[in-house]
Amino acid sequence: MGVGKTGVVGLLRNGDGPTVMLRADMDALPVEEAGSAVCQQGNRHRSRE
């Protein structure tokens, strides 16, 4: 199933229970972020090890 010509959707039907949704972008566009998270602007693309 295509979304927006280049997107992909996967449907998992596993019955009742908790659901987790993941989203990933592969274009590496700069993003302005607010807050004091470890990965906020200035620390982008660094390993968290």
Image (cartoon, rainbow, N blue to C red):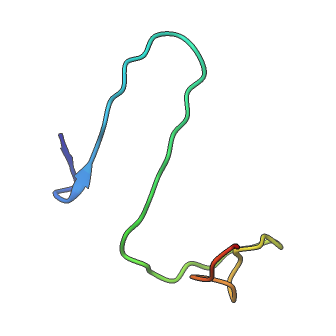
Q: List the single residue furthest toward the top.
A: 16
User: From the image, which quarter does the N terminus lie in?
Assistant: top left
Q: Residue at x 57, y 82 (%)?
A: 45
Q: Is residue 24 left or right of residue 11?
A: right
Q: Residue at x 51, y 83 (%)?
A: 30
> Residue at 55% across / 27% down in the picture?
19
User: Residue 29 is drawn in which quadrant?
Assistant: bottom left
Q: Is residue 21 above or below residue 34?
A: above
Q: Picture coordinates of residue 39 (x, y %)?
A: 70, 74
In which quadrant of the rendered view does residue 48 lie? bottom right
Residue 42 spot, x, y in % from top left: 69, 89
Which residue, as the protein is rendered here, is positioned at the far bottom? 42
**Image check: 9 left or right of 42?**
left
The answer to whether 1 is drawn above or below residue 26 in the figure is above
Q: How many numbered discs?
A: 0
Q: Position of residue 11 (x, y in %)?
A: 32, 30
Quadrant for the C terminus in the image: bottom right
Residue that lies at the very extreme toward the right in this rendered image:
36
Question: 41 or 13: nearer the eye?
Answer: 13
Query: Which image quarter: residue 47?
Result: bottom right
